[in-house]
Amino acid sequence: MIIGLHHAQITIPKGAEENGKNFYCGILGLAEKDKPESLKGRGGFWLKVGDAEVHVGTEEDFDRLTTKAHLAYQVEDILHWRNVLKQNDIELIEGVPIPGFERFEFRDPFGNRVEIIQEIVD
């Protein structure tokens, strides 16, 4: 039986870890989580997101702009995140509407597709 989602992984180019941490920890405010010693030599970094994790790995020769694969971060104040991203010159992309939710998308500095989503509570 599957009981939950432990982590999801995205990738950034090799050597871009500091830029990745600046974006994900600095701008998005996600907390970095220590990687096990046995994995530290592989590059990348891990993030804590609620009760799950996002593992940011490294890989070369992959065009992230060609994929629809993405992570969706659930938020409580979507307007705040629109403003934060606009202030950091991140282009926002309006997503196809989903009943009961407000959402938008953007590409991180490495081309990964990211969604911000908030449930509409009446």
Image (cartoon, helix red, strand yellow):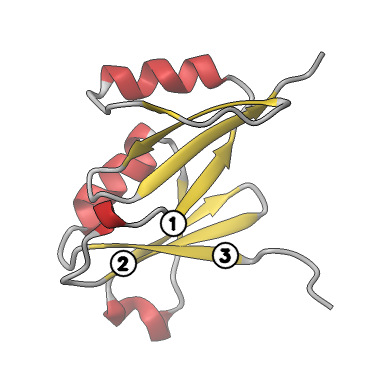
Closer to the chain start, of discs 3 and 2, is 3
Above or below, comparing residue 41 to residue 58 in the picture: below
Q: Which residue position is annotated with label 2?
A: 44
| Mark 3 or 2: the one toward you | 3
Residue that appears at 63% across and 28% down: 118
Instruction: For mark 2, give the secondary structure.
Output: loop
Q: Position of residue 121 (x, y in %)?
A: 78, 19
**Label 3: few (<14), some (14–19) or many (≥20) C-alpha neighbours in 10 Å:** some
Which amino acid, by three-letter code, is at mark 3? His
Q: Is residue 41 left or right of residue 50?
A: left
**Label 2: few (<14), some (14–19) or many (≥20) C-alpha neighbours in 10 Å:** many
Residue that appears at 25% across and 24% down: 88
Residue 40 falls in which quadrant of the image? bottom left
**Circles 2 and 1 in contact, beta carbons < 8 Å:** no
Q: Which residue position is annotated with label 1?
A: 69
Name the mark on residue 7: 3
Q: Position of residue 18 (x, y in %)?
A: 21, 53
Question: Which of the two residues, 40 or 28, is positioned nearer the viewer here?
Answer: 28
